[in-house]
């Protein structure tokens, strides 16, 4: 549900400007409009690359929360089941 909400916010923020997507996932495919990433970077005064990382983190956190809620498990267990454990152990 939260992942769907995040997607809706991204689409409503950008409108229908065209299919220019960038993959923000590491080993996963998360297509996010390049325009959204660029605006995110400008709003937060960070580089495009930093914006990709932050958008990826937010997307993963939303997926984890949605999975945990759906299956009634902890966020840590959801992270493991979804395969995000290695990405967050830095």
Image (cartoon, helix red, strand yellow):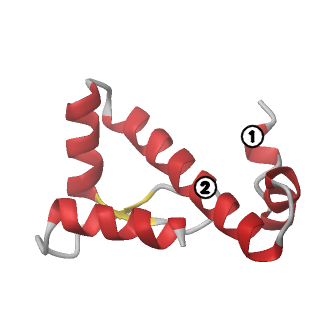
Q: Is 82 above or below relative to 38?
A: below
State the separation of the CA atoms marked 2 and 1.
10 Å
Q: Residue at x 46, y 73 (%)?
A: 4
CB under 8 Å between callouts 2 and 1?
A: yes
Q: Is 14 above or below relative to 57?
A: below
**Residue 76 percent across, percent down from the top left:** 85, 50
Q: Residue at x 44, y 47 (%)?
A: 55
Helix, strand or loop under label 2: helix
Q: In terms of image quadrants, where is residue 48?
A: top left
The N terminus sits in image quarter = bottom right
Q: In terms of image quadrants, where is residue 7?
A: bottom left
Tag 1 residue: 88
Determine whether, in the image, residue 53 is placed left or right of residue 75: left
Tag 2 residue: 60
* Residue in front for this viewpoint, 36 or 77: 77
Q: Earlier in the sequence, mark 2 or mark 1?
A: 2
**Residue 78 percent across, percent down from the top left:** 81, 61
**Residue 44 percent across, percent down from the top left:** 29, 28
**Residue 41 percent across, percent down from the top left:** 28, 35
């Amino acid at each position: 549900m939260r992942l769907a909400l995040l997607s809706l916010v991204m689409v409503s923020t950008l409108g229908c400007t065209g299919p220019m997507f960038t993959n923000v996932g590491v080993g996963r495919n998360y297509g996010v409009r390049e325009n959204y990433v660029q605006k995110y970077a400008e709003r937060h005064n960070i580089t495009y690359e930093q914006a990709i990382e932050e958008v990826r983190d937010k997307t993963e956190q939303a997926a984890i929360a949605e999975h945990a809620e759906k299956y009634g498990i902890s966020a840590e267990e959801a992270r493991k089941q979804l395969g995000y454990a290695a990405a967050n152990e830095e």
